[in-house]
Image (cartoon, helix red, strand yellow):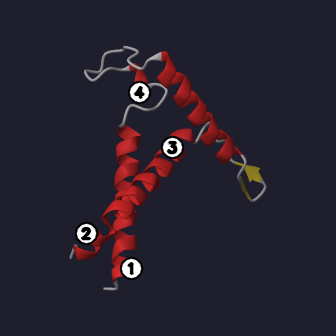
Amino acid sequence: MDSTIKVREMLLVFSVYFHLILNYFPCSFSGRQFDSEGNLKEWWNNETIAAFRVQTQCIIDQYSSYKIDSHRINGRMTQGENIADNGGLKQAYRVRATNTALLLKVK
């Protein structure tokens, strides 16, 4: 198999893997309100909450600007998946940037 195709396939797998992790990581509006034992408890500080809201609004605005046919996407309703998609791709590219030589050796 061509090494470029192998790396692309592995990056696709990493992207999906990290997407799934981010779907279950407590980064959503409701997930952040529960501690590691499942108890309702605010464990983020105010600075972290404010920064998360700014970054989340950026994702909402970006996706709300997209249209499919004549229908505009509701970025607020799709934000959880959009965050996981973007985070999964970002982590896959981080893997690629630091481990391309290692990825090429995987059989």
Q: Which mark is residue 102?
A: 2
Q: CA distance from mark 4 to mark 2?
A: 35 Å
Q: Earlier in the sequence, mark 4 or mark 2?
A: 4
Q: Which mark is residue 4?
A: 1
In the picture shown, does residue 105 fall above or below 67?
Answer: below
Q: CA distance from mark 1 to mark 2?
A: 13 Å
Q: Amino acid at mark 3?
A: Ile
Q: Amino acid at mark 1?
A: Thr
Density class for disc 4 (Cα within 10 Å; few <14, some 14-19, many ≥20) is some
Q: Which mark is residue 24?
A: none
In the picture shown, does residue 57 fall above or below 11?
Answer: above
User: Which residue is labeled 3 in the image?
Assistant: 83
Residue placed most toward the observer, 64 or 107: 107
| Left or right of residue 47: residue 5 | left
Please state which of the two labelled residues, at mark 4 or mark 2, is closer to the viewer. Answer: 2
Q: Amino acid at mark 4?
A: Gly
User: Extreme bottom residue here?
Assistant: 1
| Left or right of residue 46: residue 33 | left
- Residue 105: name its quadrant: bottom left
Q: Earlier in the sequence, mark 4 or mark 3?
A: 4
